[in-house]
Amino acid sequence: MYHDTKKYFCTLMSCTEVWWSEMEHIRMPKVENVRLVDRSSSRRTQVGTLYLTATHTIFVGKGSEDRSELWVLHSLVCDVLKHKASQNGYPLIIHCKNFQVIQFIIPQESDWHNVYISLSRLSRPEKYEELYCFSFNPNVDKAEREHSWDFLDLKAEYSRMGLPNKLWHVTAINREYRVCDTYPADLFVPKSVTLPVIIGSSKFRSRGRFPTLSYYCKENHATICRSSQPLSGFSARCLEDEQMLQAIMKSNPGSRFMYVVDTRPKLNAMANRAAGKGYENEDNYCNIKFQFIGIENIHVMRNSQQKLIEVSALRSPSMGEFLMGLENSDWLRHIKSIMEAGIFISKAVAEEGVSVLVHCSDGWDRTAQVCSVASVLLDPYYRTLKGLMVLIEKDWVSFGHKFSHRCGHLDGEAKEVSPVIDQFLECVWQLMEQFPCYFEYNEKFLISIHNHVYSCHYGNFICNSQKERKDLCIKEKTHSIWPHLWENKLDFMNPLFKPDQSQNQGLLRPRTAPYCFKYWRRLYNRFDRELHPRQSELDCLMTVKEETQQLEEALALYEQKLAVLDKERAKTLYMQKGVLESKQALWSSPLDTSLANTPQDYIGGFIGGAPNVFTLQQGERESAELCLFGDKPKSSDADNSDQESGVADFSSHSSGEESLPSEDSVKDPDSDETGPNRA
Amino acid sequence: MEFAELIKTPRVDGVDLHRPFMPTVEGTLCLTGHHLILSSRQDNTEELWLLHANIDSIEKRFVGSLGTIIVKCKDLRVIQLDIPGMEECLNIASSIEALSTLDSVSLMYPFFYRPLFEVIEDGWQLFVPEEAFKDLESMTDEWRLSEVNKDFSVCPSYPSLLTVPKDIDDESLCKAASFRHGGRFPVLSYYHKKNGMVMMRAAQPLTGTNGRRCKEDEKLINATLCAGKRGYIIDTRTIAVAQQAKARGGGFEQEANYPQWRRIHKAIERSNVLQDSLIKLVEACNDQSHSMDRWLSKLEASNWQSNVKEILTTACLAAQCIDREGASVLVHGTEGTDSTLQVTSLAQIILDPACRTIRGFEVLIEREWLQAGHPFQQRCAQSAYSNGKPRSEAPVFLLFLDCVWQILRQFPCSFQFNENLLIMFFEHAYASQFGTFLGNCVAERVKLQLSQKTVSLWSWVNRPQELERFLNPLYEPNNLVIWPSVAPQSLLLWEGVFLRWNRSTKCLDEACQEMVHIIEYNKELQNKVNSLRRQLAQLETEESPLQTP
């Protein structure tokens, strides 16, 4: 491991200029005798060396046998805090956007301060060019990198939906991003609308985001369209906008009306009228049914998640504290409201065959959530790995969800940050909980996407619109996440997925009783290993399925050989024995329950905290604890080394040519602990 | 008494049965001495076949001459019967009320039930103390089987045979018994093979306000410690509650009198508080208002999950003392028949892999609950819908099952059984055709002659045909101690019981079937591959001589 770290530094040395500019911010490249505190038990700490590099904070444990490493990507750091110094040293707390919390104790005050200043600066890049994706340089050639950007093709996605057709076509009007700079270049509109209508409509909509197609239902021609709010004020109207909606309605020949869904609470929408914005007046638009669905705004959501994170990070809370905290955060209520909006739209489309226009204020947050949740409910394709990627690429990336603002990629307006995409991913997770057999992917996939939305490791989620990405030459300078996830798809598969069933199922009809919404422990307590089931059903089934596949192959092979033997009984065949010898052991291998075999602190330090009473046993206990700790790094090693965004693998894989570095969820930190049969 | 006296209207036609997530059924309602039956006579099946004993409470409503009876069951199900005719409806309602609250145990259904299956293995013989003691003897000679309670006179709630330290004679046991609540002197609950540590259980010592002590009790407890070793006394009550108990003659072990023991107080709630918790939880689960805030605050206010956490934590602590601290443990609360048993039985599930098999789990329930004198009949007389004055009802056993379920969720591959087994035990503890859970202690069961007059639940469960649906397809025996997480984030609401009737399980059932399918297919392939390989190897050896030149 240590050699790998060295190798990593060598690699870095040969890196770009960005790196050198970053180096200026590093006041302290290395601190010795730093302690890494295990948050589940403050008694477990590791001593080691802390390195600050241009892209990562690295902690290398000093244990004689297990040299555990912890890598934290600077772009994942959302907060660096100094805690009150104690006699042990100077604590530094790092909060990450993937909900990891790391506590270091630094022996010297000056080092403490320098590390703090350096990290504070490094974790708040001011320019896009400083982001990790621009310096991340796996061993792939230019052609391959460019190819990675062709992995998803939105044109193919629209044609999968059945577009263009005789009613819908692509308009070239936004090719240069002149009508709407936050929209993609290619947009689907009804064939019947003329350019002046589009332009007129766009002038009547916030940021020019005119109504355009998001999803088309081949079976009944109903569509989900999206836009921003109309600039209606108290009385303004726009003929072109009215024509636009009329055209959308008419492009669904089977229906006599369409829904216009405003995803904001009515009060918010009304307040917008005073600012010359607002919502559609049913009297002005022919045959629309207008509907409010009260999803709160980004600020409410940000505060809500903040509260949720605080609850999730409580150290040994009581059940009451946890449930009250969960309730007070309001998080699940918000998730429920988004889900209900998605259900409303999916039912309108699938059951009523009616088209829906969805908007909020700007049409890039709540609108994106609601359209994509409805799509997952409607179309089994989006419940496949590739389908979810496409959906995110379409409804979020291409339609200008402001990833960089919402995820705080750059140092900037804190008020722009909001967990909008988190909520979408969580809605999908809640659905997976209700429909365990209808999703091709598992929750690791969602968590991995979540991680990369924030990590800035790949270029996909950088910037706030397609235009910005084009201007920044993202495709020329960075790599795409999707092929990387696809290569690791074995890790993301749901063993219970039944494709036929899912197809038949068509529209998902989730229940929305409050108790159907659960706390997503795997995401919010992702790094608190001790809180998760000690054996994973998922991993176990995955292993069995893998083994089944090998058995199927073996069976075919044996059958073939038997057939040959039967035919030519005189001839002898050499058997390739051993093909299966090793596999037989898989299912029956003993459990690796190293963690299972570690008790928690069930009494709040009672036993450990009374040395005077049990002088005799104290020594024994400490040695037990030491042992305990001694075998821990082994697991936390795997946990840490590939956890943070790949550079660890970067070095370890550098011999293996084409493999892109894998990052945390690809090799799930839990994998070594949970899976029986993994051994 | 004749049941017929209680049944004024044995049969009504044209009754509508409404159940959540199922279509309404119209049929004929029949009342028998023990059952409420509704059949539409469509395909020879009875849509409803409900034990009166399962009925927790009923409500009547009238609209014109159409009467409605809402039947709330102890297994938490709620069904609605629309009965034409006011008189019929009133008759049915009063019959149900009378039949579901019969006082006499000997009128209960198990005494009338005749099994339709052949009893191959008599469940009443599932746990034989002498045989269990033989196992213990093979590991240690520190213990003996005492017959001091042969006629249940020393301790009415204990079984006749008890495992006690070898050096303590029956006379001392009697003295120790007089110093413990209900005569429940410390007895062996579990022997940890790995390090020879033990778990004992008892009731509270009767120290009273003036600090009575009992040399025999002290000696008895100390006899379980190896030289120089110390032990822990886990009192399941808070120190405040334990102090209060002194005023009523109870109390706790004074450290001065038990210098080798360290006392730890935990806060497991008493039975009436638990009953209240269950009622609130079930009410929250049945609330149809669809408001997230209301659900979470009601869930929180019910305190059910807190109770689960506290019981599980205490059990983990006991297990930790034994396995990690290498210390012996004595567990007690007040009577030693409720929280004490929750703790000792859960600790064994954590420590002892045998308890995670179906048979082992049955033996655990038999040994640590039934024989140990948990008053099932009192505790399970009413469930969450009881509107009468609570007497001694409490979901003590249900909480234990919930805790087992939590561990099962966290170690889905370490248990031979699945959730269905736990749910089934919950149902049968409250209402059953089997005699297993009747009575409050062994003495009562002997008096009722249950083993002669009723069928044991185990006789039925252990039939291969029945066992199948209780098997966990992911089971891989795991010999390790399993330490569950007791953090609130890790503890879930047991939907299989509390939301069972409020949800459609179609998707979850599908997932279960798929899981079974995946594993069965794998095993099938393994067998095929193995046999083919053998076949090939055989052919190879047969023919290899040909090839040797």
Image (cartoon, rainbow, N blue to C red):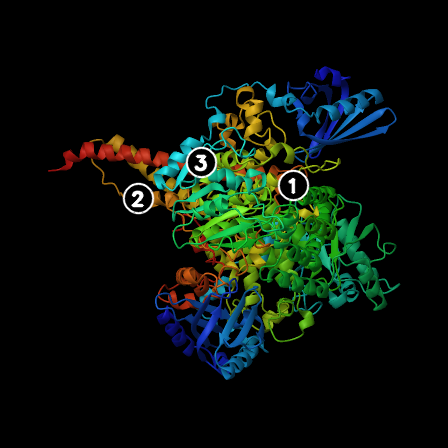
Question: Would residue B120 be visible to someone looking at this image?
Answer: yes
Q: Secondary structure at mark 3?
A: helix
Relative to the observer, which residue lies in front, B289 or A14? B289
Same subunit under labels 3 and 1? yes
Residue occupied by mark 2: A581
The quadrant of the rendering that contains the N terminus of chain A is: bottom left
Residue type (three-letter) at the residue carrying disc 3: Glu
Residue A605 at x, y = what percent? Answer: 52, 61
Residue located 80% across and 45% down the image: A256
In space, the residues marked 3 and 1 are separated at their CA atoms by: 30 Å
Q: Residues within 10 Å of mark 2 (few under 14, many from 20)?
A: few
Q: Quadrant of residue A294?
A: bottom right
Relative to the observer, which residue lies in front, A284 or B462? B462
The answer to whether the residue labelled 3 contacts the one labelled 1, judged by CB atoms less than 8 Å apart, is no
* Chain where mark 1 sits: B
Residue occupied by mark 3: B520
In space, the residues marked 1 and 2 are separated at their CA atoms by: 46 Å
Q: Residues within 10 Å of mark 3 (few under 14, many from 20)?
A: few
* Chain where mark 3 sits: B
Residue B45 at x, y = what percent? Answer: 64, 21
Q: Residues within 10 Å of mark 1 (few under 14, many from 20)?
A: many
Farthest-out residue, left: B549
Residue occupied by mark 1: B498
